[in-house]
Amino acid sequence: RYCWYDDAYGNLDNPLESETVNDFGQGKQNTIDMIANWNSSGYGSQNANSTYKDMWGVIQTAVGNISDPTWFVPSKSEWAAFGDFAYTKMGVDTENYVNYGLQGYYWSSAQSNTRGAYYADFGNGYIRNNLVYGNYFVCLSATF
């Protein structure tokens, strides 16, 4: 489990205009931008939470080339598309998602406001938002 970026609370400056914005295809750029912000302490100090590290520092070795990553944190709409596919094509639902190796909550790369980011909630079947110091799991995505 990781914070999105604990010290960014109140400092985020690139939120989606609304909850209904389709940001499909933005996960890769969001990841590039957020790693750059985290590396420069652009939104505050790194790993300010003594219990959970910020995901942007932890994922960097898995992401690969920071300026053109192979792996990235999915956007809000990319998580929604995965959830829709998993539900309609594989039968994953709010009762059996753990049988497919999924955790309850995963961070997205999309900012919801100056204090929070979106996450996928498999236990309830929603995309929600929470404060950046929340602690959720991280799953990277790739396009081929």
Image (tube, helix red, strand yellow):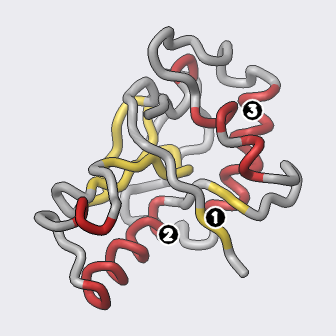
Between disc 1 and disc 3, whose residue precedes? 1
In the depicted view, which residue is nearer to us: 84 or 111? 84
Up the image or down, 34 lies above or below 64; here it is: above
Seen in the image, is 140 located left or right of residue 51?
right
Q: Residue at x 61, y 17 (%)?
A: 47
Between disc 1 and disc 2, whose residue precedes? 1
* Mark drawn on residue 78: 2
Up the image or down, 132 lies above or below 6; here it is: below
Residue 43 position, x and y percent, is: 66, 23
Residue type at tag 3: Asn
- Within 10 Å of the Cα at label 2, are there few (<14), some (14-19), or many (20+) other Cα atoms? many
Q: Residue at x 38, y 69 (%)?
A: 80
- Judged from the image, the secondary structure of the residue bearing numbered disc 1 is loop
* Residue contact at pointers 1 and 2, CB within 8 angstroms: yes
Residue 68 position, x and y percent, is: 85, 60
| Residue receiving disc 3 | 37
| Residue receiving disc 1 | 26
